[in-house]
Image (spheres, rainbow, N blue to C red):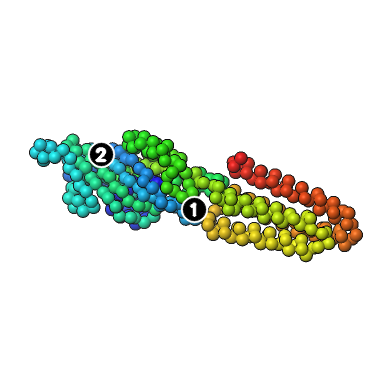
Amino acid sequence: MSGIVIASPHPRTSWSAAVAACLLFATAIRADEPIPAGMPNPPARPTRVDCAILIIDVVNIDDLNESFQAEIAILASWNDPRLTFDPQAEGTNLKLFQGSFQFNEVFKGWWPQLVILNEVGREEPKAVTVMVSPDGTVRYREQRNAVLETPMELHDFPFDTQRLKASMIPFGATSDEVVLAVDERFAKSTDDYVRRENKDVNVAGWDLQRLDMSVDETFMMAGEDRTRFSRLVTTIQLQRRSWQYVWEILFPLLVLVSVVWSIFWVEIDSLADRLNISFIGVLTIVAYQFVLVENMPRMSYLTFLDSVLISSFVMITLTVPQSLLIHSLVRKGKQRWARTIDRTSRWAFPLVYFLLLASVSRWYGII
């Protein structure tokens, strides 16, 4: 699948560095001070920047590091009367600046530098264009690859739905200076894309459900100063394709637990054979847990799969004291009681196990 981001044409080091720089620049010009004339400053106070984030492709979703990699297209437009020109005098109806060199060295107009707060590292743009119309309307386009950190809700893993977010603010410009707005034309085209490509989008193991763009304000503190920044938040909603986990983890797990229950048909005086089967099941569950821990982020809560593994571990472990009880009854000459307990265990253990799984599934909202 894909994601989108609005970004600055210049490199950024880290989130904390970006925030510190924003606060530093924001305090340089106060809201009650007039904007000096000249191109380095925004054309109005505040200047409205219409933005859109288009999906090209989500390359990878990393559950372990709670991040995703996306090929993104960045679109922004604003009006700067200082850039108006006469088409006849200039001999063109559109001034076009293509590539990083023309943008950095030839284009002399003002532009908003938008930073992605949750971006990891910074890739150079693959393509960038700036188009200036005779009325001073500026349209900025950029395409690049980005890795973004975003918290993931994995309570109901592997039946989870993730909302991956990208948060962007104008670098060094408070909400009194630059206001971000969602370009509704591109928002509608994105909705059409989601409806058209929700089953075929190129994200291994995920289905694209929707893409939302919204604008709000965020506050940052520097000592006693509280600075407001306009923020654009892009949310990509995906649903995990769970059947691979069902067939590769959950189904073999159910078969394993069922195989361990075969001890209820083993001779009541064969304690060693019964315990061997039980311990093999316990060790297999432990191996399952090691594999799961290595491929999941460190969380302070149990996922649905964790709860299923724990339930299976408990049910297999309970077969050990059951076998010891049977052995104790046999040694005391109470073979009839031992066989009765075995026959009862043949249906009691599966019934309790599946009731436990049903309760866990209902608790996590799976059923």
Q: Which amino acid does label 1 sit on?
A: Asp
Which residue is at 32% across, 34% downward?
Answer: 185
Q: Quadrant of residue 137?
A: top left
Figure check: 153 above or below 330: above
* First along the sequence among labels 2 and 1: 1
Disc number at residue 63?
1
Tell me if 183 is positioned left or right of 92 in this view. Answer: right
Which residue is at 83% across, 62% downward?
Answer: 269
Residue 54: percent from left, percent from top: 35, 42
Residue 10: percent from left, percent from top: 28, 53
Figure check: 115 above or below 189: below
Dot 2 falls on a residue whose secondary structure is strand
Tell me if 204 is positioned left or right of 346 in this view. Answer: left
Specify whether residue 302 is in view: no
Specify whether residue 129 is in view: yes
Q: Which amino acid does label 2 sit on?
A: Trp
The residues tagged by marks 2 and 1 sit, at their Cα atoms, a distance apart of 37 Å
**Residue with the mark numbered 2:** 78
Disc number at residue 185?
none
Residue 15: percent from left, percent from top: 38, 53
Figure check: 133 above or below 347: above
Dot 1 falls on a residue whose secondary structure is loop
